[in-house]
Image: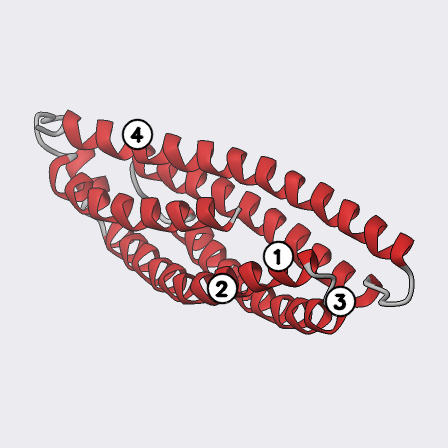
Amino acid sequence: MMDKLKHQIMFFALAYLLLCVLFSSCGKGNNSEGSDTLFFSDDTTAAAQLVAEANEDLNKIKIKYNENNAKRKELIEAMKSNNTEKVRSISDDLVYLIKDGMDLGASAIEKISKARDKNTNADFKEYLRLKEESLQKQMEAFENYRQAARLLRDGYDPKNEKQREAVKIEFATKYENIQKIMEVAQQYSKQANDLAKESAKKGN
């Protein structure tokens, strides 16, 4: 799941660069009144700034991702060796790391939502809608991951082998669900990036 998150973040950064092209090219080849005025309005500038600020939040998530990924690998090893103390300790760290990532994600979503309220053209609005949908799905996956980490932290009983195995199975089920949610998030993000590319081509 976190590998896919990394790709999502990279996609968003690349798509922002494409938006710069979108801003400069969308008015070309169309002399109809309103198109240039609408797209180069103050609202478009403000929306672009909000997207840039959201991107800063996502860059911070990259750091959390690296920390999270290292912890996840440690967690897998601890579970394989049934090291209860380590499983609980690492799971506790993950709960807080995921919460920090979710806070940053919520901040990015809020900024994109504000950008969507600005007076911009249809392509830009649709791009933002798809990106927000993608981030909302990622947040859903994060929440599932947080619950899975709490499950290990609170339910991994060193004295109860049956319970430990049950917790492992439930964790695996939750993790599988997370991956499915992230696949949907990736689809939304791909649609947004494809739209940005097509919009840039329209202006050439």
Q: What residue did someone put label 4 on?
A: 194
- Residue 181 as seen in the image, left or right of residue 45: right
Residue at 62% across / 48% down in the picture? 140
- Mark 1 and mark 3 lie on one chain; the one further toward the N terminus is 1
The mark closer to the camera, 1 or 3, is 1
- Residue 122 as seen in the image, left or right of residue 109: left
* Mark 3 Cα shell of 10 Å, populated few (<14), some (14-19), many (≥20): many
- Between the residue at mark 4 and the residue at mark 2, the CA separation in whole angstroms equals 32 Å
- Residue 43 as seen in the image, left or right of residue 90: left
Q: What residue did someone put label 2 on?
A: 70
Q: What residue did someone put label 3 on?
A: 153
Say which quarter of the image contains residue 59.
bottom left
Residue 25 percent coordinates (x, y): 12, 36
Viewer-closest of 80 and 115:
80
* Mark 4 Cα shell of 10 Å, populated few (<14), some (14-19), many (≥20): some
- Mark 1 and mark 4 lie on one chain; the one further toward the N terminus is 1
**Above or below: residue 163 compared with residue 132:** below
Residue 198 percent coordinates (x, y): 23, 27
- Between the residue at mark 3 and the residue at mark 2, the CA separation in whole angstroms equals 17 Å
- Between the residue at mark 4 and the residue at mark 3, the CA separation in whole angstroms equals 41 Å
- Mark 3 and mark 2 lie on one chain; the one further toward the N terminus is 2
> Total of numbered circles in the picture?
4
Q: What residue did someone put label 1 on?
A: 76
